[in-house]
Image (spheres, rainbow, N blue to C red):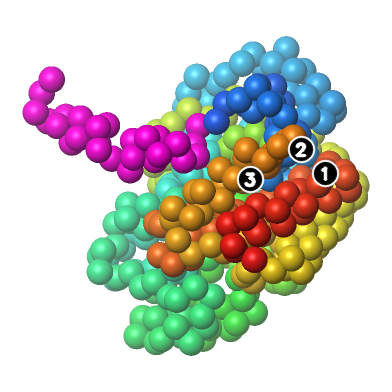
């Protein structure tokens, strides 16, 4: 093999994944058989699924599945091209119009993944050397990479301490007026806490800065009928861009940015991940349209999800876990050390008669010392299942001396 790949060889033999596999604590790539439901078949056993982003339980909704099948009959299975060229079908336009209406904006651009939405939109917006980007320390990796791809001076980047408004104010202080874009997750993906949008908006207005919210975990979950963070804070008219993904509440894959017509026109012609990648398959668009049909009329899935989140947050805190500042159905159990986090994952997963699948989150996905087990919930979970999960957390947490 070429020497170029020496690093791969070394990593294969001595890298952290191999060490973890040898210790029997490697937590990734467990295989799921069948549908993503509250109880999944994983590695040939029944497991309680607390590591999914299927917040509204829509992956298996009969109306949604039927809509995806019908779209295949009408449009075939794929678009085979970029939106700019042959990849714009009726259903892409219909979806953009529906999403714009849902999010309360003039317009919306649909991307093929949420990652691509952030990469494309943020890098396209950072087009001039003297522009600044101001980003929360715990923003998602796709935001971090979108910033890296920007054409502004790479030094014009400031990271403020997580949800710390003094730190944000300090970052903004020296930026020229009208030259900065503030970007924040609406609901933070690892700990389920909320951005302080009132304060962020005041600080932004003071510097005439743009505001971009990543609502991957907020759409479908917060705001009336799940319209997201801006709607939750009653500031839809003030926030300049809201990005969302289809890979969570919308139960499929894809992403979008909702904004005014001028900004969306800019993205359609400048966002490279939009221009140089094929558009989402019709069945994906139909899936999202069917879920919009459901949640625009019926808020009960979201209400159920919030109630489950409240029950679990209270239950886990009462047992003695540190659940951080979560106010959503993403609830972290802070462990604070990588190996213990992975061992806790394993203990939960291997619990008998059935275990729990969670997401072990370690550095760099979380700051060092804040390693955690991320739990998240599904609207279709029964009371029996959530109570069973609480019992398992108590047993495993005591075993690990975490509580
Ligand atoms: C906050 C946040 N933004 C963006 C993304 C990317 O979304 P997608 O899975 O659609 O690529 C994710 C996915 O995990 C996310 O959590």
Identify the image quadrant of residue 23: top left
Residue 300 visible at all: yes
Magenta stretch holds residue 7? yes
Which label sits in the foreground, 1 or 2? Answer: 1
Left or right of 60 in this view: 373 = left
Q: Which residue is pictured at 59% across the width and 63% down the height?
A: 402
Q: For mark 1, what is the residue?
A: 385
How far across and down, in percent of the image, does residue 104 sit?
Answer: 73, 58
Q: For mark 2, what is the residue?
A: 38
State yes or no: discs 3 and 2 in contact (Cβ < 8 Å): no
The secondary structure making up most of the magenta span is helix
Identify the image quadrant of residue 196: bottom right
Q: Nearer the viewer, residue 229 or 356?
A: 356
Which class describes the residues within 10 Å of circle 2: few (<14), some (14-19), or many (20+)?
A: many
Q: Which residue is pictured at 73% across the width and 49% down the height?
A: 392
Left or right of 193 in this view: 3 = left
Distance CA(mark 3)–CA(mark 2): 16 Å
Q: Quadrant of the C terminus?
A: bottom right
Magenta stretch holds residue 46? no
Mark closer to the chain start, 3 or 2:
2
Q: For mark 3, what is the residue?
A: 348
Residue 189 visible at all: no
Distance CA(mark 1)–CA(mark 2): 8 Å
How far across and down, in percent of the image, does residue 22 sit?
Answer: 37, 35
How far across and down, in percent of the image, does residue 108 sit?
Answer: 62, 48
User: Which SS class for mark 3?
Assistant: helix
Q: Is residue 254 above or below residue 121?
A: above
Q: Which residues are magenta?
A: 1-29
Q: Is residue 229 above or below residue 384?
A: below
Distance CA(mark 3)–CA(mark 1): 14 Å
Tag count in the figure?
3
Q: Quadrant of the N terminus?
A: top left
């Amino acid at each position: 093999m070429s020497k170029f790949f020496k690093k791969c060889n070394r990593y294969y033999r001595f890298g952290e994944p191999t060490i973890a596999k040898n210790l029997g604590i490697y937590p990734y790539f467990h295989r799921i058989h069948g549908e993503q439901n509250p109880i999944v078949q994983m590695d040939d056993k029944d497991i309680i699924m607390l590591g999914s982003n299927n917040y509204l339980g829509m992956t298996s909704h009969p109306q949604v599945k039927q809509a995806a099948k019908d779209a295949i009959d009408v449009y075939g299975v794929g678009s085979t091209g970029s939106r700019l060229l042959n990849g714009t079908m009726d259903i892409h336009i219909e979806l953009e119009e529906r999403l714009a209406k849902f999010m309360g904006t003039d317009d919306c651009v649909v991307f093929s993944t949420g990652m691509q939405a952030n990469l494309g939109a943020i890098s396209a917006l950072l087009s001039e050397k003297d522009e600044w980007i101001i980003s929360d320390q715990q923003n998602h990796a796709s935001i971090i990479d979108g910033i890296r791809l920007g054409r502004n001076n790479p030094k014009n980047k400031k990271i403020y301490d997580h949800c710390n408004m003094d730190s944000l104010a300090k970052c903004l202080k020296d930026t020229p007026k009208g030259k900065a874009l503030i970007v924040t997750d609406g609901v933070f993906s690892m700990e389920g806490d909320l951005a302080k949008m009132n304060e962020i908006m005041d600080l932004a207005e003071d510097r005439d800065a743009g505001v971009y919210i990543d609502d991957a975990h907020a759409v479908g979950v917060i705001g009336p009928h799940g319209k997201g963070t801006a709607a939750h804070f009653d500031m839809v008219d003030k926030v300049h861009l809201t990005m969302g993904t289809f890979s969570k509440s919308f139960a499929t894959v894809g992403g979008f940015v909702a904004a005014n017509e001028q900004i969306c026109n800019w993205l359609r012609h400048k966002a490279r991940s939009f221009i140089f990648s094929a558009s989402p398959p019709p069945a994906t668009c139909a899936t999202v349209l069917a879920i919009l049909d459901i949640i625009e009329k019926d808020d009960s899935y979201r209400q159920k999800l919030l109630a489950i989140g409240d029950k679990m947050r209270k239950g886990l805190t009462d047992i003695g876990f540190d659940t951080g500042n979560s106010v959503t159905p993403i609830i972290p159990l802070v462990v604070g050390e990588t190996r213990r986090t992975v061992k806790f994952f394993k203990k939960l997963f291997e619990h008998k008669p059935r275990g729990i699948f969670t997401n072990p989150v370690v550095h760099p996905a979380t700051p060092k010392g804040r390693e955690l087990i991320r739990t998240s919930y599904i609207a279709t979970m029964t009371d029996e299942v959530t109570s069973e999960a609480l019992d398992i957390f108590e047993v495993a947490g005591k075993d690990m001396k975490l509580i």
